[in-house]
Image (cartoon, helix red, strand yellow):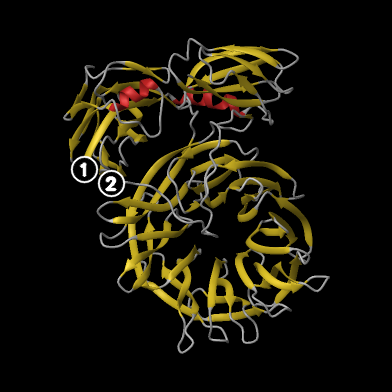
Amino acid sequence: MYRTLYARFRYSSFFTRFLILCCCTLCSSSALFAQQATEAWAARYGAADRDEEPYSITVDQAGNSYVAGIYANTSDGSQWVMVKYSPAGERLWASVNSNGSPKSIAVDNVGGVYMIGNMDGVAPSGGADFMTVRYDAATGAQTWVSRYNGPANGIDWVSALAVDNAGGVFVTGRSEGINSKSDYATIRYDAVTGAQSWVSRYNGPAYEADNATDIAVDNAGGVYVTGTSYSYSYSGALVPTYLTMRYVAATGARTWLNQYGTSLSNSAGSIAVDNSGRVYVGGSTQAFKDIYGTVLCISASTGNQIWSSQSSGSVNSLEVDNAGGVYVLDYVINRSTNTSYSTLARYDAAGGVRSWYKLYDGTPRDLGADKTGVYTTGSGGTTRYNAADGAVVWNKPQNGNALDLDQSSNVLVTGLAFDPSTGNDLLTVKYSQVPSADNSFTFYRAVNLNGPALTLDGNAWAGSTAPNYSTNGTGFTNSTTPLVPATDAARTDMIRSSVYRVNSLKVSLSAVPAGIYQVYLYVWEDNGAEAYSLTLNGQVVRSTYNSGLAGTWARLGPYDVTLTAKGSVQLVSRGGTANFSGIELWKQQPAAARTETAALPAALPLVSAQCQAYPNPSADGRYHLVLPEALRGEVEYVLLSAVGQPLRKGTLHVSGTGAAELDVSAQLNQPGIQYLQLTGTNARAHLKLLHR
């Protein structure tokens, strides 16, 4: 079973160019090892005779996730579908509806889930109408459907959806006017009944195509709408402008209107509001041949502009973290080189100063943020960045169309899963963020299931002849299929030499002492894609794993298991042919040891720092470091493996110029990636070290 997550960009469908980035060695004081992501579960939904495509995902306060998509090739056109999953990944219900094209979904705090889309318009003119649907979150039953057909009985195209905590459901979009090409149309529905509370339309002075593109609500009774409206410049020319307005949520009364950009061509696409009384709008500005982005900050109470900042390219997504950060995904077109790429940037919410920006490897499709992290998904995979400096905290190769975060900062991503027998299905993945440098678990035992003893990440692995290990699988070795992604030589040899079996492959480690363990399993695919589930000591830990195309490998886990007495740890597959390569056990330390090791880093102050190491990669494990002023004198270091386990500790003597020599040749006996954690009196930093 072939699994990949992909779909089109949420705001635009033409961003198809890719930027291939060189790997850069960066150092920052952000806690790169504070959290890593593990796949908690993956669930697919689809039918054998239909292709599905995901559009949106949202998560409620209890951690349930809701995914909206379409059946793309039904006999009577597209149908939309809504699927609900529990926090554990169990599918609770699925609801399929009549023809339409979903745009967005939202969930409220009183048991409602809402989807907007477009439906066929009312005869005789036809066209398209807004459609808003409410589902009962507990059962998936459709409780009401509301249609909006504008006064011209023409084309009405819904764009965005928001809900508040006072029983309001708000939608906005463009609606054909009687004497205008199109107007802003914003509607409030009663969440319980679906009755229309109010409608507000806006027709700009030019009677041109006014297009509302996004909507947001706050906790102070405000509804904010932005989009593009045509107006006249000082010279009398007709130009598109940002047009943002605030409504009173209860009545629909407009309290202010903010227009920006009457001298150039402007188009607003995204809006967000924070808890400090500020509204942020992002879009694009075209000046002759140049296209760049503009981010506006507007007072929520008065509508006055607080600041504006120019971004690298057209703003395609915008988020705030309520901790002083505004995050923007841009699409940049360089006309002189005929290239295009995307960037992610942070702006200071108070003053609009750009704190950092990063090139994005691929085509981004969605953006999310919490108080410490920024999250993207798209063709470059799913990535978390540190909010303070933009450093990559983790990256998962699965591409996605949309993401959302739950109350515990778990990341839910939805996209496509392709299977030759069923076509495209909806695939939803939950990533759990857990401490990677948490010393509460230490390496206990690992076995190379069909190969010799070896050392990986500084840990000694037993070979396939080790005692207290058994399997019902058949051993095989494939030494020619390239691994995806590529990895170091020792790990490559271990992965390619595995055991396999159809339907029920078992791997057991016996005589394991009582304790709490985390289990990791190396799997790979040497041939056609397969799908199977995994149980650990009889409990399902992975309901569906899709092995991918030939060469795909993964380190699954951690999966928790508790032994109250000496016993066995057993992993069993159910379903298609599974290939297991290696198993690892990590044992929890006593509570006193956990407290002591976990408390040390938290007491240290953290400041931003940049550092360099060269040569990097190194052939012999020796590096020359150049450190910033904040790291001088005696600086403690910890060398960590690729999975965050300590390999060596020591002290560097950093000169007044910031130079220091590091020799870790004894620890870097295999090619691969390690990380260096540096701690000085006033700063802490991390550096990625490559060894070839």
Residue 506 in the figure: left or right of residue 148: left
Task: Check disc 2: other Cα within 10 Å, few if <14, some if 14-19, many if 20+.
Answer: many
Image spot of residue 18 (x, y percent): 52, 45
Image spot of residue 180 (x, y percent): 65, 82
Tell me: residue 161, above or below residue 605.
below
Which residue is more in the foreground, 469 or 205?
Answer: 205
Foreground disc of the pair 2, 1: 2
Residue 190 in the figure: left or right of residue 669: right
Image spot of residue 229 (x, y percent): 69, 71
Which residue is more in the foreground, 585 or 431?
Answer: 431
Residues at marks 2 and 1 touching, judged by CB atoms closer than 8 Å: yes
Instruction: Identify the residue position indicated by label 2 in the image.
Output: 1
- The residue at 42%/59% (across/down) is 54
Looking at marks 2 and 1 on the same chain, the residue that comes earlier in the sequence is marked by: 2
Instruction: Identify the residue position indicated by label 1 in the image.
Output: 576
Three-letter amino acid code of the residue under disc 2: Met
- The residue at 47%/79% (across/down) is 146
Which residue is at the far bottom? Answer: 124
Mark 2 residue element: loop
